[in-house]
Amino acid sequence: MQVPAQFEYERATSVEHALALLAKYGPESRVIAGGHSLIPMMKLRLARPEALVDVNELTELSGIQVADGELRIGALVRHAQLLASAEAGALFPVLADAERVIADPIVRNRGTIGGSLCQADPSEDLSAAFTAVRADAVIRGEEGTRMVPVREFFTGPYSTVVGPAELLVELRLPIREGSGSAYAKVGRRAGDWAVAAAGAELVLEGGDVAEAGIGLTAVGAPRFVAAEAEDFLRGGAASAERFEKAGVIAAEHCSPAADQRGPVDYKRHLVATLTTRALHRAADRAGG
Amino acid sequence: MEITVTVNGEPHRRTVEPRLLLVHLLRDDLGLTGTHWGCDTSNCGTCVVWLDDLPVKSCTVLAAMADGKRVRTVEDLGHGAELDPVQQGFVACHGIQCGFCTPGMLMTARWLLDHDPDPSEDVIREAISGQLCRCTGYENIVRSIRWAAEHPDGATP
Amino acid sequence: MTYGSLPRKEDARFVRGRGTFVDDLVLPGMLHGAILRSPHAHARLLSVDTSAAEAHPKVRAVLTGKDLAERGMAWMPTLSHDVQAVLATDKVRFQGQEIAFVVAEDRYAARDALELIDVEYEPLPVVVDAPAALAAGAAVIRDDLGKADNHVFDWSSGDEAATEAAFAKAEVVARQDMLYPRVHPAPLETCGAVADVDAITGKLTVWATAQAPHAHRILYSRITGLPEHRIRIVAPDIGGGFGNKVGMYPGYLCAVVGSMVTGRPVKWTEDRSENLMSTSFARDYHMRGEIAATRDGRLLGLRVRVLADHGAFNGTAQPAKFPAGFFHVFTGSYDLPAAFCSVTGVYTNKAPGGVAYACSFRITEAVYVVERMMDVLARELGLDPAELRMRNLLRPEQFPYTCATGWQYDSGDYPRALTLLKEISGYDELRREQAGKRARGELMGLGLSFFTEAVGAGPREHMDILGFGMADGAELRVHPSGSAVLRLSCMSQGQGHETTFAQLVSAELGIPPEEVEVVQGDTDHTPFGLGTYGSRSTPVSGAAAVTVARKVRERARQVASAMLEVSPDDLEWERGRWFVRGVPGRGHTIREIALAAHSDLALPEGVEGQLYASTVYSPPNLTYPFGAYLCVVDVDADTGQVRVRRFVAVDDCGVRINPMIVAGQVHRGLADGIGMALMELMAFDADGNHLGGSFMDYLLPTALECPSWELGETVTPSPHHPIGAKGIGESATVGSPAAVVNAVVDALAPFGVRHADMPLTPAAVWRAMRGKPLRADLAIS
């Protein structure tokens, strides 16, 4: 089996300690939580951090709770934990939909929400899901805490706004009355990364769309957002025709690349199909 | 660095490189070769062990991350002639061919039944979906786990 | 108990995690090896600088092609009369080819040192597109052989003129091009070896993932110059083989040389990407099928033209006289008056191999082409595919049947198997359901496949590996207490030999199977034979085991006659006992006879003491298992996703020794069919980059893609096997891919789709529906 190159390792005992360690080891250090994104990259020697700061003991980051009209998900929450959370599933079914199709049950036991987001893989499912529900990322640094909308969190493939001496600590999802959400994905096989996937949230008022959120993954949507489709939906009727049209708009405005998962035309088609499917399911769940 | 890992109830203190993978600690340092490895990318699942009571892929855990924690491997499932019901199920239902995926499958099966004593076939298939088997077409693994669910105390002597 | 579903003896260790696989071995002072591989698919090697690696404190040796050349070991013979580079000296010819070997104190240090080797390459034009390999101006890959093109061989079988005539008078002719793409057996345990040269005796011991330990010993002997008695090959438990572990790989030899150089044991185990990128693949057959028939669906002729991509070295592990394996049974299960096939092999800048995936030496490709053509023809004729097959299947009274290319099928009752399949599956009801769904725009498909396998090579005079005839030795000794040890030349990779072969001996001698020890895999402790692949264990070694047990039984008769003081002719055998005919109370069990055979009992002249025999079994013919399969799929018309709803398999492998194990073998092959038809693929981009080099990219089916298999069976004994058994190990891998593809194509019929190449990923299905099929073997652009 391939093995990582050498590095230093230290285990953090608190958020403050983790920040101090990151400062100590400098920009070539990396935070490690579940390790299911980072360790495979290190084995293939595509990632070669000089030091790892292990945050697995930071149990204060392992909670899922509702406070101040938000669902708050600690960065160290494991995928399996989020999937098992009845509260999260009821408030944001998009999360359970997505978690059910992320990797496999054993990987989900270990991989973390924060790790998935910070890896910023262009095919990450949760990035699209959190984008759809307009979550905020809570980032701690030695200077203090800052909030960044997930829609501004990603700066490019494998790159985020989290600084070298900062730590993503929490995701906050605004709970909206009359909302529903869903996630639809096509992979080549169970556990595969998405060929394409779409997450959607709808806030309905009467029969109309008060607010729409659409996140797309694996198809080159800027910061995972299908902004034009959201704009189109906002303020209009929650109808099958409009959901279909929104899918077409989303497909027009993303830029998928051909790879062994599929050619561009197919991926674009999937964006349309999956966006429409996610919107229908979100609308059903919103009671619309 | 120095670590202490409690494996199958026994604490082991070792000096290791931080990069040492848990699967290699188990196999190469502790001689527990029941845990296997079969890929580089956390896909095959032949390395599944329990880390503090949760099944994990030990090829994707650093030994350092297991410092101070409990690990359970296939070697702890049965004792001597006595086999865990999941082990008995794999024998009774021909859930084993080459034996390479077996230890990982057993560890997942035991965990599943501890948390869901009567899983449906679909639940079992989902539970083992992160673990590949090239020999059985999964059919007899599913049956083996069902057998264990139906015989929680093992075979009637 | 004799035949029957006996639980496996092997499981006692496997279920406890106590199997011993190659990477589990630890020898005192053992070092670890790692291989530096080429990132280029085709490049001239300008220089290899190992000085920095050698300076690594934990490195004990670094080997390059130059070092091996000095020992005359830079090249090794393949099993197909070609040579393959062990470590490259002149050029690299595929991505992942071996360049240098590091031996270090631990596996991590060995890996680290690979990064310290500096290689200078001069990239050369790359040949990845097999149809373009013979084009004028294509880069020549095998200049080492003095070749001026990339041509490997031309080979044909059948009567070309008669086939031409059949086509000329046919009312209907259907043609279809199809690709059986490059796939990989991907056993969960990768390949590996531990080599140990004894410093005092010079004896070389190699523990290796070897399906054919004796064939490996021949190769080591030829390459190293050591005589066989100074080479011992031991195959410990093997974590799946499926043909991947038949041949010799450079890593094994590097470990051997590493041990020679350092004087210490050296372990080498490849990682998954090395396994996928450099070891034996399978298929890569570009085929054109043509079928001729009457308007009412009577087959007249079949013609197939193949372009075979063999990679950079011709390294197929198959009987050497058959460059296209057993492809000539492409006439399948049908009464075909005329048939002709021609195969052209080409070199490309890809890994060598060709037959390494449970395929019975190209019968997978042969079954695929004929079964696809049957569906293409059925569509053309407007006939139900089951009906077209039933009209043309060989009839029981035609056996033994000699097909149009000269192969003699031993036995079969094909219509019975197809009829049973239709009953079990509720075929007619499924067709009605499909019609209803089609009317509603839903896509459901039924795919049939009827296959005939040809397994159990030799006979020795027709089939050989490197000139060694394919016959298997067996030795059986009954100990004084009546327990026994059977020594075999074949080697299990999960098939349960320790159980089934004990059952064979038990059935012949009445010794309980748990008292029959089966020894395999160790060339110092087993007779010569060519190993386990091509489903040959039961047909060849199984027959050898029965034969040798019967010889021991005859010896026991002589001993019993001395014990009972009667003529051997007056003795009768029943359930483990010789007794005096007509006096059932007067006799002796095999246990009593065994003790007497070792005792001071006076034996008649010419009768040796002890109960021991050996044999060498050369089969008179192959055995021909067969089966009828049905796959039922649902296709999501919007996404192209395929769900296999049901898979029903009726298999006939003659007499079943252990039906539980037989069913398990079938299950495995059915999962292979799902994998190959829907997801497994090794494609290459224009630069020769391997696009399936990990389990993230080379997808294997999980429990979620596999339905609960539904099995049925018929039993048509083989007339020439001592107990009427046939091989089963590869039947389902051979038969199932066509059923899955036929099902998907059937589902897509409303879109006018009559063929689509594997793997039928969602993208491939969606493109097929739009008449813009993807080329499976090249990068998607």
Image: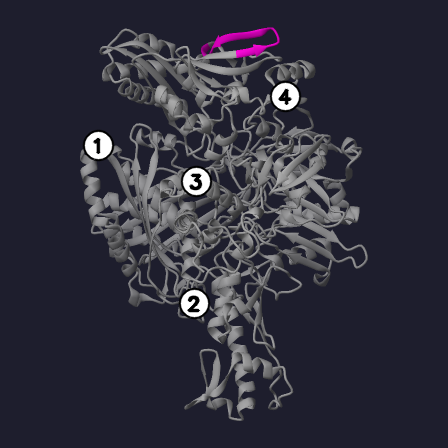
Query: According to the image, label 4 marks what residue?
Result: A12
Q: Please state the chain letter of the residue tagged with numbered disc 3 in the rendered image.
A: C
Identify the element where label 2 is drawn. Answer: loop
Q: On the same chain: label 4 and label 3? A: no
For label 2, count other residues whose C-alpha is less than 10 Å away and answer few (under 14), some (14-19) or many (20+). Answer: some
Task: Find disc 1 in the rendering and name its residue.
Answer: C441
Start and end of the magenta stretch?
A139-151
Residue type highlighted by circle 2? Tyr
Is C364 left, or right, of C173 in this rendering? right
Q: CA distance from mark 1 to mark 2?
A: 50 Å
Q: Secondary structure at mark 3?
A: loop
Q: Residue C702 has which mark?
A: 3
Q: Mark 4 and mark 2: span between their CA atoms?
A: 61 Å
Q: Quadrant of the C terminus of chain C?
A: top left
Instruction: Answer with the quarter of the image where residue C65 lies.
Output: top right
Image mark 2: chain:
C
Q: Which residue is mark 2?
A: C3
Q: Do the residues at discs 4 and 2 belong to one chain?
A: no
The crowd level at tag 1 (other Cα within 10 Å; few <14, some 14-19, many 20+) is few
Residues tagged by mark 3 and mark 1 found on one chain of the structure: yes
Please provide percent x and percent y for residue A133.
39, 14
Residue C677 shows up from this direction: no
Residue B2 vs residue A42, the one in the foreground: B2
Q: Earlier in the sequence, mark 3 or mark 1?
A: 1
- Using the image, determine if residue C553 lies above or below residue C700: below
Tell me whether circle 2 and circle 3 mark residues in contact (CB < 8 Å): no
Q: Chain of mark 4?
A: A
Q: Secondary structure at mark 1?
A: loop
Question: Is the residue at mark 4 from the same chain as the one at mark 1?
Answer: no
Disc 1 marks which amino acid? Answer: Gly
